[in-house]
Amino acid sequence: MYVGRPPLPLAQLCSMAVDEAFLTVAGIAELLQVTEQTVRNWIERGQLPAVRVGARRVRVRQSDLDAFIAASTTGQAEAGEPESRAEVVADDAELVVLLRSVAQAVTRLADAIERR
């Protein structure tokens, strides 16, 4: 059950740009150094948009993850959405540095995927 915005259906996925990078829950969890359950919770709450691929699998567009990270580091969540932990503690200097390094790593990953 999804409280926020549910993952997009496969038909909508097919209509998106072909060169858009899609990430797995496991990949995002590793990249952000959180658990896979945390990523799933963000998706279920509608904080991180996802695309449903099959009955149980979801993928997250690179651009949606980038927007999620940007909103988390600047504290600019969409109106009506629950606050993420990153927004609540955005004044923690160490966390801000960590999130910036994650954003840079995501950019490098996207560049590497593009070069393939």
Image (cartoon, helix red, strand yellow):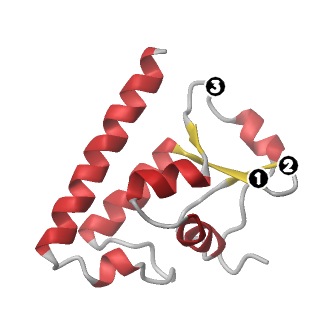
Image coords of residue 26 (percent x, y): 58, 53
Name the residue at 38% across, 80% down: 85
Q: Nearer the viewer, mark 1 or mark 3?
A: 1
- Side (left or right) of 100 relative to 61: left
Check contact, mark 1 vs mark 2: CB within 8 A.
Answer: yes
Residue kind at label 2, given as amino acid type: Gly
Residue kind at label 3, given as amino acid type: Val
Binning the other alpha carbons within 10 Å of mark 3 as few (below 14), some (14 to 19) or many (20 upward) gives few
Residue kind at label 1, given as amino acid type: Arg
Disc 2 target residue: 54
Marks 1 and 3 sit apart, C-alpha to C-alpha, by 19 Å
Q: For the N terminus, which image quadrant? A: bottom right
* Marker disc for residue 57: 1
Disc 3 target residue: 18
Name the residue at 51% across, 67% down: 35
Image coords of residue 17 (percent x, y): 62, 30
Residue 84 location, quadrant: bottom left
Residue 43 location, quadrant: bottom right
Q: Which of marks 1 and 3 is nearer the N terminus?
A: 3
Secondary structure state at the residue bearing disc 3 = loop
Marks 1 and 2 sit apart, C-alpha to C-alpha, by 6 Å
Secondary structure state at the residue bearing disc 1 = strand
Residue 115 vertical placement versus 79 (above, below)? above
